[in-house]
Amino acid sequence: MNTIPVTNPRSGEVDYQAPAVSREEVAAAANRLRLAQPTWEALGPERRAKVLLDWKQAIQRHAADIAHALCLDTGRHLLAQIETASVQDWISWWAGRAPALLGNVRSGKSVMAPSVEYSHRLKPYPVIGIISPWNVPLILGLIDAVPALAAGCSVLLKPSEVTPRFAEPLRRAIEEVPELDRVIEIVTGGPETGQALIDHVDAVCFTGSVPTGRKVAVQAAENFIPAFLELGGKDPAIVMASANLEIAADAILRSGVGLTGQACQSLERIYVQESVFEDFVELLVAKASATNINWPDLHTGQIGPFIFPPQAAKVQQHIDEAVAEGAQVRCGGQVEEHGGWWCPATVLTDVTHEMKIMREETFGPVLPVMPFKSSDQAIKLANDSIFGLSGAVFAGSREEGEAIAERLTGGAISVNDAGLTAQVHDVEKNSFCLSGMGGSRMGDAGLLRFVRKRAILFQSGIPACLSAMDESLAARDRSGD
Ligand code: NAD
């Protein structure tokens, strides 16, 4: 079998080879899943929930190995533990929620034709394909898989070729639960494996960049299957003069620099009201300067390496181009190589909307800060983007914050905090503009998008005869005979 070399982001060395699963093997896996799915669906939501909870226990038994694999692929220790714990929480959440959601099936009489009685059946898509990115490998591999399984679908998952190591220990946890083992398979590989997957599934969930999302959407459209796309962002934060600047600076730093800025909902543009601009920048720079990269000791600092090494050059280019165009580096600003690549927390001022750093997704721990005069101007600047994932507003009162939030383009706006969708999975939200397409992955819709409604329609009266469409009867009516 062909393999894909995997780089350790801390050492910069290739120290793992992942199988590059071929088109034929993807087709065979999809076929196995399709054959197994009717039995899984027939189990019903309660029994499936029980199987999922058994899987949660198995993941717990393999938690150390899964977290270790994630740590090797991402260069971060604590977040690897958090990822492994989070997926167990979701399994509990969906196992608890699915029976009620799937049991809530309507039946009744049609209002338009009262002699017709109906009842709905919820039919899961047989095989859901999942293509995931490298930035939060386990969470983004399973965020759609768990509700799809709870809904009665089978799942074919292709993790990013940059971070595929978790597949081996996760597979061992799956194998310990035979009923589940028949309905979820993991295929590692690159773009070709992803393309093959789209040709053999009934709906695809894709998390990744806009350019790849566009290709996935085109291929899905050609195959007439739904594509649920969760793509990039350039999330703005607005800080009003009335805000608690200390709280705003803490939340903005956490959201912009946490995960080394390698999160879709990282804050990447900060707009601060003119009267508090310098005070805010001073606070933010002090807090950012007090952070550290987690090198040489993995167990220190808050900022991990770039998981995907080419990302380091891209982030440095965004910073350097901004500086060449007049931006000031207030702290950080220089990517460091220690085998792998790190970037310290970086704050820039004197930025403009002509710069890449304010327009394109940077995906690094960089906070460009820009002043504004009025809330109207702040809203205009925040909405001047091709993306519409999420955003944040900091204000002195809930009313002021929510009035601004309401006018921002984006699917989730946090008020007096940032990136709350990373913590709040039970609240529905959509991705706007180029940040995505398709139903909410959060909240109840996150499961219900995996089932289609079949209506069973019963005629309790006499069916209409063809004479109801007889043109000569209509002509007689018109002539008044
Ligand atoms: P990417 O688009 O490069 O790759 C994502 C996945 O797509 C990988 O598994 C890759 O192998 C696969 N792929 C590549 N070409 C393909 C093709 N032609 N057909 C099918 N599959 C293909 O994204 P990435 O660099 O891994 O991830 C970073 C991006 O993900 C950022 O833009 C980030 O904002 C985005 N992201 C979005 C969310 C969200 O929820 N909106 C969450 C996390 C990350």
Image: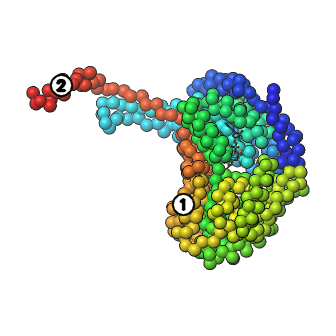
Q: Quadrant of residue 335?
A: bottom right
Q: Quadrant of residue 296?
A: bottom right
Residue at image mark 1: 408
In percent of the image, x 63 and y 42: which residue is there? Answer: 213
In percent of the image, x 81 and y 32: which residue is there? Answer: 3
Quadrant of ligand 1 in image? top right
Residue 146 appears in the figure? no
The amino acid type, in three-letter code, at marker 2 is Leu
Nearest the eye: 102 or 28:
28
**Is 324 drawn above or below residue 133 in the view shown?**
below
Residue 22 placement (x, y as % from top left): 74, 27
Residue 379 placement (x, y as % from top left): 55, 65
Mark 1 to mark 2: distance in Å?
Answer: 58 Å
In percent of the image, x 69 and y 76: which residue is there? Answer: 278
Residue 229 appears in the figure? yes
Label 1–label 2 contact, CB within 8 A: no
The amino acid type, in three-letter code, at marker 1 is Leu
Dot 1, crowdedness within 10 Å: few (<14), some or many (≥20)?
many
Give the position of the C terminus as an image quadrant: top left
Q: Is residue 224 left or right of residue 462?
A: right
**Is 320 drawn above or below residue 219 in the view shown?**
below
Q: Quadrant of residue 412?
A: bottom right
Q: Secondary structure at mark 2?
A: helix
Q: Is residue 13 left or right of residue 431?
A: right
The mark found on residue 473 in the picture is 2
Residue 167 placement (x, y as % from top left): 77, 36
The mark found on residue 35 in the picture is none
Q: Is residue 426 left or right of residue 466?
A: right
In percent of the image, x 51 and y 66: which residue is there? Answer: 403
Q: Residue furthest front?
A: 324
